[in-house]
């Protein structure tokens, strides 16, 4: 598709996660010279410019999840008029669990040019620091707030051979880790990366059970604060492999006979065989009734 001669462009520009030293020279130039800066939060973008010693030449406009649809139309008109529109989120890459997708979608549909000034990303930073396999990975955004929906989302990766990265609220991190341990098994490798590149950066690695214990201890003290990413390691190669039902039920029975609570026994056996805890629990109940 041919473009109008006076067509401008949209530039998706990554901003630092916390350390201003991570701002690229290209980001500095774009913020200083763009005709329009479309910002997730104009206050945060002003603080970023001040921290970088930049005085924007162009107009700073709010472009966030609540006004994205309406704002995109006006921004595209500016691009058609030959202006450069720089899209920034509060931290990291726009469109990645941040505003920007609708703007890009509309620009692509209109045949207008979109490019990117790459830089910091919480997803790849957390992945790199996790110590978990990074040759195959997925980013799955924020886990759902409702327990049932969160469990269903985690069931989707029960046998996934890839590492999976989630964002999470600090207030829900402890409960999310508890559900991860229950659904995926306490032995599943997990990493919590908090406040990346900032003064109080913290990276905690271990099994799901170990991370649950860490979260409980932290919640009893100072609490979990700041931006959080949870990285879940891949399922074991034999996860989901067929297992004889009688043998599995016998394993649960052996654990409960030794004093383990039924729920904990089911969770342990399900994790060992790559089974769904709820389905195994129901099978145990059915067997007992039978």
Image (tube, rainbow, N blue to C red):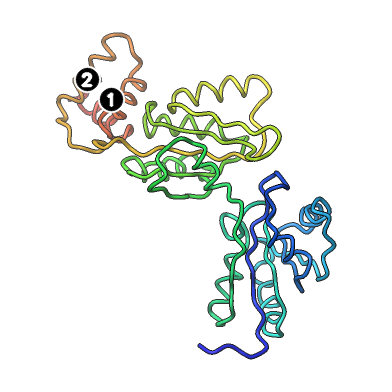
For residue 33, the mark is none
Mark 1 residue element: helix
Q: Using the image, determine if residue 284 lies above or below residue 115.
A: above
Is residue 181 shown left or right of residue 143? left
Mark 2 residue element: helix
Kindly identify the residue that appears in the image at 71 percent across and 77 percent down. 74
- The outermost residue toward the top is 258
Is residue 92 shown left or right of residue 1? right
Q: Which residue is mark 1?
A: 269
- The outermost residue toward the front is 25
Name the N-terminal-most of marks 1 and 2.
2
Q: Residues within 10 Å of mark 1 (few under 14, many from 20)?
A: many
Kindly identify the residue that appears in the image at 83 percent across and 55 percent down. 53
Q: Are marks 1 and 2 in contact (CB under 8 Å)?
A: yes
**Numbered disc total:** 2
Residue 107 or 219: which is nearer the viewer? 107
Q: Which residue is mark 2?
A: 251
Kindly identify the residue that appears in the image at 39 percent across and 26 percent down. 186
Image coordinates for residue 119, horizontal then vertical, percent? 61, 55
Q: Residues within 10 Å of mark 2 (few under 14, many from 20)?
A: some
Kindly identify the residue that appears in the image at 25 percent across and 31 percent down. 273
Q: Quadrant of the C terminus?
A: top left
Q: Using the image, determine if residue 65 lies above or below residue 212.
A: below
Image coordinates for residue 280, horizontal then vertical, percent? 27, 31
Quarter holding residue 77: bottom right
Question: How far apart are labels 1 and 2 at the CA level?
Answer: 7 Å
Is residue 155 shown left or right of residue 223? left
Image coordinates for residue 148, horizontal then vertical, percent? 45, 41
Is residue 67 shown left or right of residue 55? left
Residue 105 or 204: which is nearer the viewer? 204
Image coordinates for residue 138, horizontal then vertical, percent? 43, 50
């Amino acid at each position: 598709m041919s473009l109008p001669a006076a067509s401008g462009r949209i530039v998706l520009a990554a901003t630092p996660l916390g350390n201003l030293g991570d701002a690229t020279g290209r980001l500095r130039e774009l913020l200083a010279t763009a005709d329009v800066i479309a910002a997730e939060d104009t206050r945060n973008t002003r603080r970023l410019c001040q921290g970088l010693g930049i005085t924007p030449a162009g107009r700073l406009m709010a472009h966030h999840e609540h006004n994205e649809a309406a704002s995109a139309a006006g921004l595209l008109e500016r691009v058609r008029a030959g202006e450069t529109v720089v899209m920034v989120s509060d931290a990291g890459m726009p469109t990645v669990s941040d505003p920007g997708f609708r703007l890009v979608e509309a620009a692509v549909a209109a045949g207008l040019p979109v490019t990117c000034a790459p830089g910091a990303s919480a997803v790849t930073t957390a992945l790199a620091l996790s110590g978990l396999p990074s040759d195959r990975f997925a980013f799955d955004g924020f886990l759902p707030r409702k327990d049932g929906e969160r469990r269903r989302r985690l069931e989707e990766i029960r046998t996934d051979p890839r590492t999976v990265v989630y964002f999470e609220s600090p207030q829900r991190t402890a409960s999310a880790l508890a559900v991860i341990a229950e659904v995926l098994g306490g032995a599943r490798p997990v990493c919590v990366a908090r406040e990346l590149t900032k003064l109080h950066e913290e990276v905690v690695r271990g099994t799901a059970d170990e991370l649950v214990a860490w979260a409980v201890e932290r919640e009893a003290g100072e609490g979990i604060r700041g931006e959080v990413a949870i990285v879940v390691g891949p399922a074991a190669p034999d996860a989901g492999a067929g297992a004889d039902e009688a043998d599995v039920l016998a394993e649960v029975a052996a654990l409960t006979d030794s004093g383990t609570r039924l729920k904990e026994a089911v969770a342990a056996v399900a994790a060992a065989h790559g089974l769904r805890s709820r389905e195994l629990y129901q099978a145990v109940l059915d067997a007992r009734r039978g």
